[in-house]
Every structure is written in C-alpha cells, then in structure tokens.
Amino acid sequence: MFTMRKREIKDWLTRYEAKYIISESLCDSIRDFIKPFCNSDSHAAGTPPQYMITTLQFDTPDYALHYAKEQEAVNRFKLRARTYGAIGSSPVFSEVKAKLEHTIIKNRAQIRFDQWGAEAIMGMELPECLHNDRQIHDFLQFKRLVWETHARPVALIRYLRESYVGTIDHYARVTMDRELEYQMTDSWDDFGRSGLWRNMDSTEAQGGVLPYSGVVLKLKTLAHVPTWIQELVERFELKNNGNCKYSTAIWREGGFRGYPQAGSFTEELLAMI
C-alpha cells in the first residue's frame, strides 16, 4: 500500500487556498477591489487576462481519489496532467496535489508535449527533457503514485482562467474560472482533440444547482493570509464550498453512464493516506 511520504514532500510548495462559486455579476466589483494589490498574470492575455487550461485527471479503478474528495478525507491527493493554450503548443505538467489537513502541497514536473504519454509514465526510462534533480524527483513521485494506485486517465477538464498575481504578498493569487467543460477519456495524450466536450458551468453547490452559470473564484496564499484577502472575503460575504471540478464531472457523467461505486480500495486509501 502507499502513503504520502513526509520526507518526499517536505520541500514542496505549501499553501492555503479557498474556493467560492460566484455569479458573473460580482466579477467586476472583485476586479476593482483587488486592483491595488494585484497585477495581471504575465501568462494571461486580453481583458480580462485569461488563458485556457486542459487537465487530464487520473483515478484508481474504484475512483478512490474522487471518493476521497466526496467524503472530505482530511488527507487526500489528486493525480493530474495539465497543459495550457492550444493543445500541443505548450508542455505537459504532471502534478500531485495533496491536501494535508488545511494545507495544500503541490509538486509538478514539466514534460515536453512530444515526450508525454503512457510510455513516459509506465515505461522505465525518464523523458529526456528532465534535466534537474527537482524535476526528476517530482516526476518520479507522480509515476510512483500512478503505479502503486493503478491509476489511469479518467476525465478531462477544460476551462478559461482569469488570473491575477499579488504585487506585495508573496504567492498571493486570485483566479476566476469560467466556461467549464469536461470529457470522459482513457487516452493519455489526446487531450480532448477527438472527443465530445460537455458543459458544466452551472455548478452544484450548497445543496442544489445554482440559478446562474457559476464562476469558480479561488484565493491562494502561503501560510500568512494577507489582510486584503480577508477583507475581500468579508466584503463580498463569500462562502467557501470546496468546489472540485473533477468530482463535478464524475457526477454529471453519471446521468449518462451511471454513478461509480466505491470499493474496498477507497476505504484503505482514506485510512492510510
């Protein structure tokens, strides 16, 4: 069996984050509020500053990672591969994103798009593009968890991210995600180019479907939460709902294919992670 080994994650990026579902009508006011504290993300373009994210989500045969979120396990993690912009125009980033109590810990390795695929993960050789110890370490961590959990590609999530970076507070981030779509897949490298995308903007939250097309607002900081972020939450009376795009996609797809059943492996995962 496996665990998230403390000696492997002690130097990962640790942070705190909170998610909120808001209406589009609030976005202008939030932009005005954060203007004195943030600049547009340098990776984004346009007004508002946005870029496309496409994420390949991995899960175990009995959907243990999905159910870990659904059951609000105190310690849990996600396995995913993420790319940006037009498919094939940027690298793929393998990511392990863990939640250990209230702290978010994430590592990731950058893989050239033409070197990403099943062979890169399941094969014995490392991609040639990995050149430093940190990248090799993070990629091997991803491989280890895929192997030990028997994880495989399950779903793709795609959305537009509006992104801002704090000018004073280290690592402060404000993002707003919209135009959420998903696609079920078993492909390691197609990234949605040959499948059907389904809309999931009307996000389930707080016991029902919201009466508007929801925008996912995310606030990220390191250990110290800046005062202006605290004031942002209070000013707009934001209610944290822990939205998970991947789990939303799984439940939405259940209307077409039936809902996945959790097996004994899920219970072992929740007990041991």
Image (cartoon, rainbow, N blue to C red):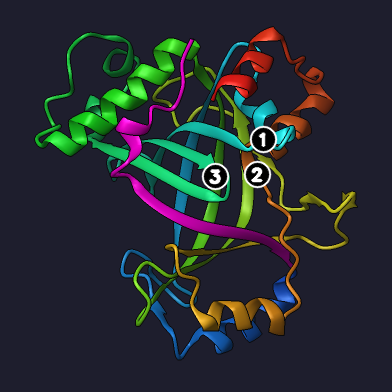
* Residue at figure coordinates x 54%, y 25% from the top left: 273
Going by the numbered disc 1, the residue's amino acid type is Lys
Q: Is residue 251 above or below residue 270?
A: below
Residue 85 makes an appearance in the image = no
Q: CB atoms at circles 2 and 3 under 8 Å apart?
A: no
Instruction: Find residue 181 and report its horizontal and vertical position in percent.
Output: 63, 44
Disc 3 versus disc 1: nearer the observer: 1
Question: Relative to the observer, which residue lies in front, 21 or 232?
Answer: 232
Residue under label 2: 244
Q: Amino acid at mark 2?
A: Cys
Distance Cα–Cα, label 1 vs label 2: 8 Å
Mark 2 and mark 3: Cα distance apart in space: 13 Å
- Which labelled disc corresponds to residue 254? none
Q: Residue at x 62, y 83 (%)?
A: 231
Per the rendered image, the range of residues in magenta is 1-22
Would you say the residues marked 3 and 1 are in contact, meaning their CB atoms lie under 8 Å apart? no
Please report whichever mark, 1 or 2, sits nearer to the chain's N-terminal start: 1
In this rendering, the answer to whether 24 lies above or below 272 is: below
Q: Which residue is mark 3?
A: 158
For the residues bearing labels 1 and 2, Cβ distance under 8 angstroms: yes
Looking at the rendered structure, the kind of residue marked 3 is Arg
Q: Does residue 70 belong to the magenta stretch?
A: no
Q: CA distance from mark 3 to mark 1?
A: 19 Å
Q: Which residue is mark 1?
A: 69
Query: Quick check: can you spot residue 83?
Result: yes
